[in-house]
Image (tube, rainbow, N blue to C red):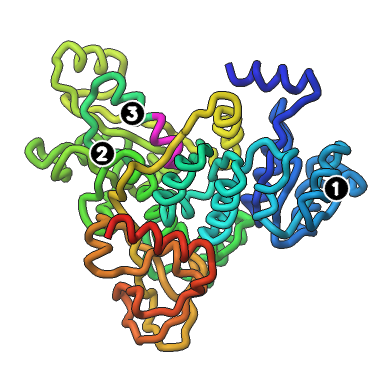
Amino acid sequence: MIHKTLLARQQAGNPIRLGASAIEWMGSGLVAAVSHVAGMEISLLANADVEEGIQAFMATGLTRDQIVEVESASEAEDVIRSGKRAVTADPRLLAKVEAVDIVTDSTWSPAIGADVADACIRYGKDVVLINIETDVTVGHILKKKAGEAGVLYTVSSGDEPGCLIELYDFVKTLGYEVIVIGKGKNNALNTDATPEMVADSARKSDKDPVQVASYVDGTKTMFEMTCAANATGCRPLQRGMVGPVATLDNVSEVFALEEDGGITKFPGAVDFVQGPSMSGGVFVTVRVNDSRIRDDLQYLKVGKGQYFTFFRPYHLWFLEAPISIAEAYFNKRIWLEPQDEPVADIMTVAKKDLAPGDVLERFGGYTCYGVMDLAEKAREHNALSSGISPGAKMVRPVKKGEIITWEDVILDEASTVVKLRREQDALFR
């Protein structure tokens, strides 16, 4: 049991010393979550806003004199060895500190995640990404580089892809035919959603309106399901997926194959459902041909008929990420990684008419949103990967609803994420 292993480390006074890149709500949440895990501590925290990082530590009960701002690996080394916590503005520093055992990134930013993962691979440090946006954008090249360097690279448990991979492995191990994997979307899809439109609901839940808008406009869902698709080989039924309204009572019927009255065109699809019944959960719908197994599943109240849906009603995001971090550290377990070749990708689509000089914003802004499609379709359109879009400058006009291509923008070619993405694309061109 991983808990017993962690507890033994705690009792020995030798916790896993975690380096974490973390910002905003997710960052403070991860710091809070790890503070309750026996045998693990965040020893070095990277946050662009150093004071925000310090406050996150203090919210767990640490005093100000137990937290030191650092700018170099040697400074961080000394602080950690002295039993204090270090905070830095440089996420790449996480990989350079010998006292740090393993590194995670819990930002929403592919740029930050790429910096962290690339640095870890270069310096031989195992890395666990809570940041699925980075994995979707450059996960294939990071996996390749990590393998060549003998470094562990994995996506964490907690977010929908990490939870889905557990269910997927469960049903595949039992020999059931996977028809659809997916998630329950927390809100109705509206690709026009802007921070202004969701400001009231964001305020009520004490969340950033930009972040909430990225949920409503579907960009976050597209990242989640693309990550799951690339890890399992499951494919979207259409561009953007279908996203039917469904409940736990009828989802098996909805996602039955077309020949059996459902909407699914082929086994091994990835999609999402709308409506409150399955909101926040993940599911795998399977087809069972063996009449004895069907009878047993019906007796055990899993469902009825030929199709059954296995449902986990929650995902705890960064709150449960420490489990996969501990598994990676103790057992070198890869929780989730992309297959050797991309299955799906996310194309950047204009949320409004865009003109030369406009700068694309972070996910959930006013300028663009992401739409999932098959990787080969994205290549055919030369679509700009959504993970590269924040900060890109338009050089050609693009109408609302049109796909933004690589030729439509100027990118920061010096950035790690752009370099890695170009290198990754060259592998599969």
Label 3: how many residues lie within 10 Å, few (<14), some (14-19) or many (20+)? some
**Position in image of residue 52 (x %, y %):** 75, 57
| Amino acid type, label 1 | Ile
Which residue corresponds to the image point at 19% horizontal and 28% vertical from the top-left? 287
Q: Nearer the viewer, residue 266 or 299?
A: 266
| Amino acid type, label 3 | Phe
Residue under label 1: 67
Provide the residue span drawn in magenta.
Answer: 158-166
Viewer-nearest of labels 1 and 3?
Answer: 1
311 inside magenta stretch: no
Can the viewer see residue 105? Answer: no
Q: Is residue 203 above or below residue 32?
A: below
Furthest residue toward right: 65
Q: Secondary structure at mark 1?
A: strand
Label 2: how many residues lie within 10 Å, few (<14), some (14-19) or many (20+)? many
Q: Nearer the viewer, residue 135 or 225?
A: 135
Q: Please, what is the dominant secondary structure of the magenta stretch? A: helix
Quarter holding the N terminus? Answer: top right
Q: What is the distance, in whole Å, between disc 1 and disc 3 at their CAs?
A: 45 Å
Furthest residue toward left: 259
Viewer-nearest of labels 2 and 3?
Answer: 2
Residue under label 3: 310
Which residue corresponds to the image point at 36% horizontal and 48% vertical from the top-left? 225
Q: What is the distance, in whole Å, between disc 2 and disc 1 at their CAs?
A: 47 Å
Which residue corresponds to the image point at 55% horizontal and 24% vertical from the top-left? 331
Label 1: how many residues lie within 10 Å, few (<14), some (14-19) or many (20+)? many
Quarter holding the C terminus? Answer: bottom left
Q: What is the distance, in whole Å, between disc 2 and disc 3 at their CAs?
A: 11 Å
2 or 3: tag closer to the N-terminus: 2
Tell me: 188 left or right of 67.
Answer: left
Q: Secondary structure at mark 3?
A: strand
Residue under label 2: 180
